[in-house]
């Protein structure tokens, strides 16, 4: 039996310079670790990230979460490392709250991920291969990258666009590495275009540029120009995805969305009209959090109107939570899930959320957070679950690039060791889906 000997937590730092939790799990002298990320535009319904709220680190210390891992260690020592489902269940029960607020989702998830890594190590499997065996679906695939090349909203301290993310999606590429190359070249083309036009080329939290341009359409035009400049065909080879993350600009009291840069306030219906115009005029294939996280009726109307044409993605709206996903499937309120481990807090619950979406023929996109570390667990998760899409920022800043590099590693490991069992599913998430 391979049973857990030790579970130890440490403070480390994320890409915004804030403390985060690292956990090491040991079985028979085999030790592996994991670190958790942290969001800035978090959804109201996410599992709770436990912070100290004291004087250290502007209240963002994680001493309490680290201390709570000692409590978790007591119940996990002696437990079979391969029993992921029960390990996660034991931690959920020990926490005893609906949103993991007693022990902290940061403490619980770091343990859950480190258990996966250690189990993979003990069994001599690559992490993606091991997660695939937990997931139970034989298929594995390399994803299309969704690369966030213009950052706005909370990710640039509200100094740029109202909308948070403008992404490029190399949906016409034949392989993962080709798609990545197209994205990298377009990123550099955009940088030189911005420079020529006299805009700043400083980057935001996810590595995208943050020019002070107060118009969505102008930003999309710029991206389209960059795609052409890089030698690719907008819409055919490289498409555009938006994550406006509008829960951040929603005023719950007067039920309106405040577009600060344009000095306008829009209702839910007016927002849907705005999205429809954009989708009709630009090569947009995916829209994430285009309405507020609690506007269920609006989401259903949006999906009805645009869901056949574009991917309607729930991030803050669904928070990787099967209860919310169930309701959204039933009410046809979206057709894709953004998957974030730390929104729900365990690997098992994340895998369940993905499985549920697959059953409903929804797309799944495995995602980073705006505060990241060099931990590239999400790359393995994405391949293991054949999610088909990964959202992990610009090809700049090492905490983002680490995920792309890990996917390139996986591609090579697969070629050498697994005789190409990992396929590239290309643009299938965007075709052949009955939405
Ligand atoms: P967050 O943003 O990590 O700051 O929540 C990412 C996203 O909204 O997709
Ligand atoms: Zn989002």
Image (cartoon, rainbow, N blue to C red):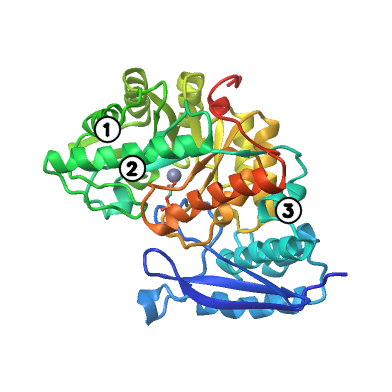
In the rendered view of the protein, which quadrant contains the N terminus? bottom right
Visible residue check, residue 290? no
Tell whether label 1 touches label 3 (CB within 8 Å).
Answer: no
Q: Is mark 1 within 8 Å of ligand 1?
A: no
Residue drawn at the location 45% of the way across and 60% of the way down: 372
Distance (Cα) linking label 2 and label 3: 32 Å
Q: Is residue 254 above or below residue 205?
A: above
Q: Label 3, on which residue? A: 130
Residue 57, percent from left and from top: 37, 77
Q: Quadrant of residue 26?
A: bottom right
Distance (Cα) linking label 1 and label 2: 11 Å
Q: Is mark 2 within 8 Å of ligand 1?
A: no
Q: Is residue 364 above or below residue 68?
A: above
Q: Is residue 380 above or below residue 216?
A: below
Q: Secondary structure at mark 2?
A: strand
For marks 1 and 2, the one nearer the N-term is 2
Visible residue check, residue 345? yes
Mark 1 Cα shell of 10 Å, populated few (<14), some (14-19), many (≥20): many
Name the foreground residue: 220 vs 304.
220
Is residue 163 rendered to the left or right of residue 92? left
Tell me the quadrant of ligand 2: top left
Q: Secondary structure at mark 1?
A: helix
Q: Label 2, on which residue? A: 149
Q: Label 1, on which residue? A: 226
For marks 3 and 1, the one nearer the N-term is 3
């Amino acid at each position: 039996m391979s049973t857990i000997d030790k579970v130890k937590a440490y403070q480390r730092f994320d890409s915004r310079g804030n403390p985060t939790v690292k956990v090491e799990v040991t079985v028979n002298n085999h030790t592996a670790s994991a670190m958790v990320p942290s969001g800035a535009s978090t959804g109201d319904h996410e599992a709770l990230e436990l912070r100290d709220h004291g004087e250290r680190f502007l209240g963002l210390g994680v001493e309490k979460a680290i201390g709570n891992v000692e409590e978790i260690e007591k119940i996990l020592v002696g437990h079979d490392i391969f029993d992921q489902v029960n390990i996660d269940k034991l931690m959920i029960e020990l926490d005893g709250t609906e949103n993991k607020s007693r022990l902290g989702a940061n403490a619980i998830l770091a343990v859950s991920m480190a258990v996966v890594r250690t189990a993979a190590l003990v069994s001599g499997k690559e992490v993606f291969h091991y997660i695939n065996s937990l997931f139970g679906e034989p298929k594995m695939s390399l994803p299309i990258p969704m690369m966030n090349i213009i950052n706005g909203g909370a990710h640039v301290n509200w100094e740029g666009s109202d909308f948070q993310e403008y992404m490029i999606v190399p949906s016409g590429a034949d392989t993962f590495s080709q798609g990545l190359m197209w994205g990298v070249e377009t990123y550099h083309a955009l940088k030189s275009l911005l420079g020529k036009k006299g805009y700043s080329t400083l980057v935001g939290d996810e590595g995208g540029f943050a020019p002070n341009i107060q118009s969505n359409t102008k930003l999309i035009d710029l991206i389209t120009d960059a795609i052409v400049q890089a030698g690719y065909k907008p819409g055919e080879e490289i498409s555009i995805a938006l994550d406006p993350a509008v829960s951040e600009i929603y005023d719950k009291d007067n039920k309106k969305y405040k577009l600060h840069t344009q000095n306008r306030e829009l209702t839910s219906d007016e927002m849907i009209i705005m999205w429809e115009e954009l989708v009709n005029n630009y090569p947009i294939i995916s829209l994430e959090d285009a309405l507020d996280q609690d506007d269920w009726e609006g989401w259903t109307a949006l999906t009805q109107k645009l869901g056949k044409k574009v991917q309607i993605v729930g991030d803050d709206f669904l928070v990787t939570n099967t209860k919310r996903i169930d309701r959204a499937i039933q009410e046809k309120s979206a057709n894709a899930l953004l998957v974030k481990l730390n929104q729900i807090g365990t690997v098992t619950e994340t895998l369940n959320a993905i499985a549920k979406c697959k059953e409903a023929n929804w797309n799944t996109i495995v995602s980073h957070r705006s505060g990241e570390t060099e931990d590239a667990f999400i790359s393995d998760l994405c391949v293991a679950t054949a999610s088909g899409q990964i959202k992990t920022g610009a090809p700049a800043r090492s905490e983002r690039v680490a995920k792309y590099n890990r996917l390139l590693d996986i591609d090579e490991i697969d070629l050498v060791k697994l005789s190409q069992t990992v396929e590239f599913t290309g643009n299938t998430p965007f075709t052949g889906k009955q939405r």
